[in-house]
Amino acid sequence: MTATPPLAVPPIASTPIGDVGQIGILVNDFDAALDLYGRMFGIEEWTCYHYTPEFLRWSRYGDAEGRFEMLLAMGGSSPQVELIQPLAGPSIYQDFLDEGHVGLHHLGVFVDDLDGAIARMAESGYHVTQTARGYGLNGDGGFAYFDTEKDLGAVIEAIEVPNVRRPGEVRRTAGAREPDRAGPRTPRIDNPLRAESVAVVGPSRDPWKTSGRTLDYLSRLRFDGRYYAVSPLHDEVLGIPTYPSLSALPEVPDVAVLVGPADRVIADLRETVAMGVPFAVVFASGFGETGRHDRDEQIRSVLAGGSTRLIGPNCIGFMHVGRSLTATFSSALQRTPLPAGHVALFSQSGGLGNALMQSLVARGVSGLSAWSSSGNEISLGFTDWVDWLTAEEDTHVLASIVESFRPGDDLEAAAAAAGERGVPVAVLKLGRSARGALGAQSHTGKLAGSGRVAQSVLRHRFGTVCTSPEQLLDLTETFDVFAGRLAGDDHELTVVTTSGAQAVLWNDLAEDRDLVFRDLGTEAAARIAEAVGSDHVGNPVDVGVQLTTADYVRIVNSVVTTSTGGWVIVTATRLAHDFDELVAGIAAMDVPEGVRLAIVPLSEDDRVTNEQAQVLRAAGAIALPTATRALDAIASAASWSKVQRTRATRGRLVGTSLRSVAAAGGTEHLTFREIAEELAAAGVPVPVSRAVRDVESVVRAAEEIGFPVAIKIDDPDILHKADAGGVFIGVDGTEAARHAAARLTAIQSESATISVQTMAPGKTEVLVGLRRDPEFGPVLVLGAGGGMTEAIDDISILPLPTSRPEVRDAIAAVRVVAAGLRKAPGAQTLDALTDAVMDLIAWAEQRGDVHEFEFNPILADPETATVSVVDAVVSVHLTPEGTN
């Protein structure tokens, strides 16, 4: 093959329609050209296509439609090298070769709008000679050639690249290095916040576009690591030199930010994974959230081929504020740099995450350590970010907004890791409305809708769950200001107020939240009374209206300095106090260790300014806007502290293996006879019983066991025996037994039996259920049993795994059950009931196939300190073949 030497650098850097991004070369021998130009330009790998007329929906050459066939190869980038060998049909390529030319033919310009490019070239006096529309998988690509050769010595081509190219054949230049076949690499970093290098793939030259912001932020805010721009279209973006591809970078970056549209980033992700980049960020929407689950599957398939972990898609990225690591397009950074501080933020939603960030910054008290959004969470989600964000040394608290948890999220592990680091995790859970109980087959499911499960799981794991953004921000500030000072028992209050009615209000609000008022002690009360000028003071401390702010500060100082722990809340109103003077006086106080000081205005007009709040923050105090919000934050902080103490003394955990049971083959129900036999063997107390089938057998069994007895239908298809008329309790004679048996045989199925049981002692009925929540997995439900189950709403919910102290506390929290155990020896009965619940969970784990259960009722008898499981509904998993 004879070749005109191609130009390594195009003769034109820019054209009326944009920068040159491609060199088009026509060849006579396609295979030989791959090696020749590959060696000349250092291109080791080509993507090759055999173009037929079917590749294009429409094309025109001159005045007629053109139907041509060619071989085409693309390799390298910035500029991209394109090799073309025409095979058949009229075309601008065939005419070039027929005229005796070979080699450089055209200079390609990548454009976003082909029609606009044609119009702009026409304005410059150049017109289309050949054009085509409809290439690419979605038919959204096109190109046009212009008659510039007479003036420029080369043809200009405008190229509108399709979102998804057709798959091509990858061919390698002869003698090129073989690619690394070692398989997935071990990532250099396992936390994206530790990234030292970032590559932005496909950045826009407009810093106001979402695709241009990331590179602008990294440059303008001065990221302390290394950052690169990857673009085959431009030599530089925002003043930053570009590289044609990720593989052309001088290093494998820690993070690749892929800023293109959905289909394009899938192609970019393939290169990212092949390179072994530890983390990729995808901003684009148009995936599962819009019904395009096929794109989700493409991403999962690409990720499966390597070790890259994906943040997104449909997210706005993440940032480490102190390092200016800004792998994000968040608009919050367009106005001003964010203040660095100690609050980490997480949100699945980018919009809500931005709003949370804005609100926190606007308060002027807390700054940010790091921030992230997770979007569709195809690869990474809440628990991953909890681990990374709480591991940051600068983080005092993590504030989170979560729409839903993934079934695989291990909240227990995430909470334990954050707790060990002493970093509270405050969660605002969206979508708490009850929905999980629809179609439930047991009382347990009806009682434990997903909304209630969410509240309980998050409280038990993280100590608190927020119900509004304001509550989340109040709690976040509280955890931030008092970081490291909330490990004790923080539910005791001392309140200083200037209004007697306010004192009453504080009492009401505190009682609603299980907060108590500290005993001032005789000596402290006397000193405070002297400062107030009163013969007697209580708590809340009503100091009345003081003539000056200085007098009020003096009294507050006497309360603060005589306190030995807990929260001291100082109310304030501009009607009586100069806030600058009050804040300065409080900031100057010598606050004893263990005392947390909070300022609460009396009215909405009594706002503490950002400047005043910052003065308080510097002194280790906080301002919260209302009494209600202040006590909500304090109660939540106390709950977190309690959970940390409980976690440290939990002991043996049960229920861990129940999280992994799958129901691939469906479920079936066990009979109570089967259940009772297994429970008895496991040491769980059950009543003596007989399984019989006919009337006379029922009567004989009742006489042998001894009256009174309980007689019940035992049919796996009848889940609620009482509702079906299948239960007779306290049967005290032969005729009564015969009557009950006749009623039960009338509803008895062919496979069902009738259970005759001795009457277990005790009138306190308890429900213990295992419910599999679609979002949180298995949870334990404890509540009032028997007839009380439907009549009242009185339950506790525990996530699994759990421990004996947690089970005992949860039982005691059920009011009806706790009331029934007050008779001596109630404490021993509570212990026996706790043991029974632990044994039931252990039994379910031992079986290994339990899906859900409801033991109802379990009878507890305080007089004998005994319990007995007298009925149950248990569903177990079937194998895919339909057998147990």
Image (cartoon, rainbow, N blue to C red):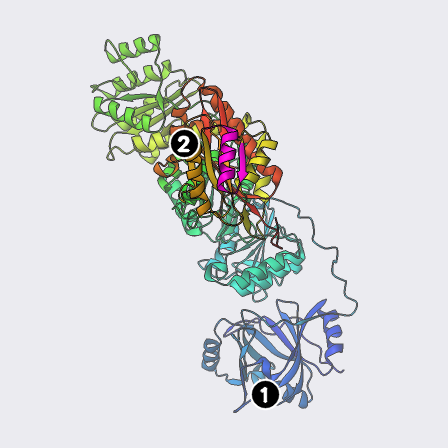
In this rendering, the answer to whether 461 lies above or below 243 is: above
Marked residue nearer the N-terminal end (1 or 2) = 1
Residue 849 badge: none
Q: Position of residue 664 (x, y in %)?
A: 58, 52
SS of the residue under disc 1: loop
CA distance separating discs 1 and 2: 72 Å
Q: Look at mark 2 in the image and give the residue it sits on.
A: 636
Residue with the mark numbered 1: 67
Kind of residue at badge 1: Arg
Q: Is 239 on the left or on the right of 434, as rendered?
A: right
Nearest the viewer among 718 and 383 is 718
Residue 454 seen in the current view: no
Give the answer, above or below, for where 711 lies relative to 212: above
**Residue 635: quadrant of the picture:** top left
Residue 340 position, x and y percent, is: 47, 39
Name the amino acid type tagged 2. Answer: Ser
Q: What segment carries the magenta color?
A: 689-707
